[in-house]
Amino acid sequence: MNVMQNVGIGSAINRVDGLQKVTGQARYAAEHPVPGLVYGVIVSGAVPKGRILALDEAEARAVPGVIEILTHKNRPHIAWFDHSHKDMVAPPGSPFKALYDDRIHFSGQPIALVLAESFEVARHAASLVRASYEVEPHNTDFHKAQAERFMPSKKRDSFQPPKNRGDAGAAYEAAPVKVSADFHLATEHHNPMEMHASTVIWEGDGGITVFDKTQGPQNVRDYLAGVFNMSAKNIRVMNPYVGGAFGSGLRPQYQVYLAVMAARMLRRSVRVVMTRQQMFTHGHRPEALQSVQLGAERDGRLTAIRNSATTSTSRYENNMENVVNWGMMNYACENAAGEYAIAPVDTATSSDMRAPGAATGMTFFEMAVDEMAHAAGIDPLEFRIRNYSEIDQMNGTPFTSKALREAYAEGAAAFGWSRRSQAPRSMKEGRELVGWGVATGMWDAMFSKTSASARLTANGHLEVASAASDIGTGTYTVMAQAAADTLGLPVEQITVRLGDSTLPTAPVEGGSWMAASVGAAVQLACRSVAEKLLKAAEKMENSPLGSASLDEVRFAGGRISLRDDPARGVAIAEIMRAAGMDAIEVQETASGGISGMISQMRKSRNTHSAIFAEVRVDEELGVIRVTRIVNAVAAGRIINPKTARSQILGGVVMGIGMAMHEESMADHRYGRFMNHNYAEYHVPVNADIGDIQVIFVDEPDPEVTPLGVKGVGEIGIVGTAAAVANAIFHATGKRVRSLPITIDKVF
Ligand code: MOS
């Protein structure tokens, strides 16, 4: 019954929330006006570990306009009824509890919340709060932390270790061509434009409405209900617009906890916004060490893979990632062994950051593959094709689809890869060395049970709703398109509601599962509306549709008509009028349908990509420029080529940042990230980005998710840094195995 309209699934419409965003009508968490608002400013601690001995608040309290200063000593006894309460995406361990006691776990930990009648007063008073500490020995040096590395356990941490096959050790020893490489990734912090912020509206009856910067309003609602022992019914969390997050908004951050605590104590509305500096005092992409050893025959056939990695976590939680699995899954090789460990440092717990695990592990594996191709004297693209696997090699399972071969081919053609000369330093233009590199990307194609409602009114207006989030990824647009596709309505007649915990249940916006999941839920809800309309039409006198089934009709232009005889049809408004219906309202839940059974069918679900990078290197000036990237993506069905392309562009930019810019630098004497601002934490700026071409290869996959959609939020970053690093080697002949590749490491 689907009718391909120019707004439905597959069409490149503009994002439906675009106008709101570019005209400033879209309000973010700290922008909602509330009368009588109290402003909270967080005081951050100065030492990495120890105890607070004393807090001197006298001077701060004397500032006119200061209402209260919350610390561990005077905080209300309302929080953490259940000391182990966790948000739904918390890793194993004991979550950080702000202002809970005098213990200091990491530098920058919140030690007080200054509440005042104006933001300026709160900020000034916060600068007057003084603390003295008993400092304990600490370690933030990840290399030193290797002495404490340990493997996460299956039982305590629910961690599935990588599955080994064959005898990788013996095969590596026997291999005629060997490569062994040790890699390091610096800590990176998510740096979305919008900082973590919460506006808590005191509703008077004990209830609260919270505008929060989060990727999951229901996760925040349930977390607040748990830690404050409140009924979830009395908490409404809203995040209609989110100014980027990249994973930093998956877990509730401490400002929402502090803001709600203050609102409940003062019985007033409260806003708390983190500073840019404070954005470096919570989750971050873990620092990582990875060792890859590869063995191959002289013809380039891989015979051994050994892949081992350690990532950083805190002392109070075990944050884990799938780092080593990707290369073991992707390449045909009979012998493969992986090992994954974590090591604690005295910082806040590391967290998910765009393509967690894969962005690290696939990148380093693909840098090692480049080294192997070079050692074997084979073109690095040809090397990958020689070792291509149609199945998931680690799990021994087929993929629902894997059009990586097509991605290699289409990417290579668009890039002009066949014109590459093999030897490093062999391509030059003017005074610059030119380098071309290739890498593979891989991510999961996940689905998460999601509900959506649909309400069609007699005037032809449709509203679809779900407690999903749009963190800039295009969820509003995806929902509108799924609805338009199913009911044949123009998007102007469709209102999408999301970002509200009172709407039908949806997961956090993460893992690249949102488009596939909420798209399917909206489609189900709209199908259910369609069925009700059809039933009503058939009850009409002289029904023009007879007893046609859903498959025999089409929805277009506000009408239902027969597929075989489009002249025979009836307007939706007319059906509803005849049936005396003002509105049709339904709610449906998508649980994955056939794809939900895939785990029993033992198929792997993944996205793949082929990334080609060009760098130009001026050796005299010590300048490296990334001039061109082609990223060819196999991600199943693309709901909107325009917004999907934007996701890949963003991922590529972030990948270039990973390759050459992003690095949170700690001064280990003080255990603190020192470059905690946009000036010194480098992300790529416009001048750092050259030409980026995105290709979506054709990959029909009816099994992977109900709509055949795999998701594109994260695949764009995976492997991009490797393509750049490999291009830098090709240009300069120099291997740099530590990211970011800053110029001091090259020249
Ligand atoms: Mo993404 S790291 O799952 O928000």
Image (tube, rainbow, N blue to C red):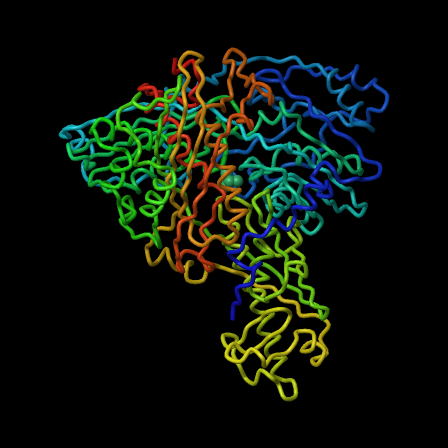
Question: Closer to the camera, 260 or 7?
Answer: 7
* Total labels drawn: 0
Q: Position of residue 328 (x, y in %)?
A: 29, 39
Which image quarter holds the C terminus?
Answer: top left
Q: Position of residue 445 (x, y in %)?
A: 43, 49
In this rendering, position of residue 477 left or right of residue 655:
right
Quadrant in the picture for residue 355: top left
Picture layout, residue 468 above or below residue 279: below
Question: Closer to the camera, 194 or 70?
Answer: 194
Question: Closer to the camera, 372 or 419?
Answer: 419
Q: Position of residue 574 (x, y in %)?
A: 69, 77
Q: Position of residue 158 (x, y in %)?
A: 41, 41
Picture layout, residue 393 above or below residue 342: below
Q: Residue at x 32, y 23 (%)?
A: 182
Is residue 49 in sight in this rendering? no
Is residue 39 in sight in this rendering? yes
In this rendering, position of residue 682 left or right of residue 490:
left
Picture layout, residue 427 above or below residue 256: above
In the orientation shown, which residue stands out farthest toward the right? 64
In this rendering, position of residue 279 left or right of residue 600:
right
In this rendering, position of residue 595 left or right of residue 170:
right
Picture layout, residue 443 above or below residue 292: below
In the orientation shown, which residue stands out farthest toward the bottom? 542
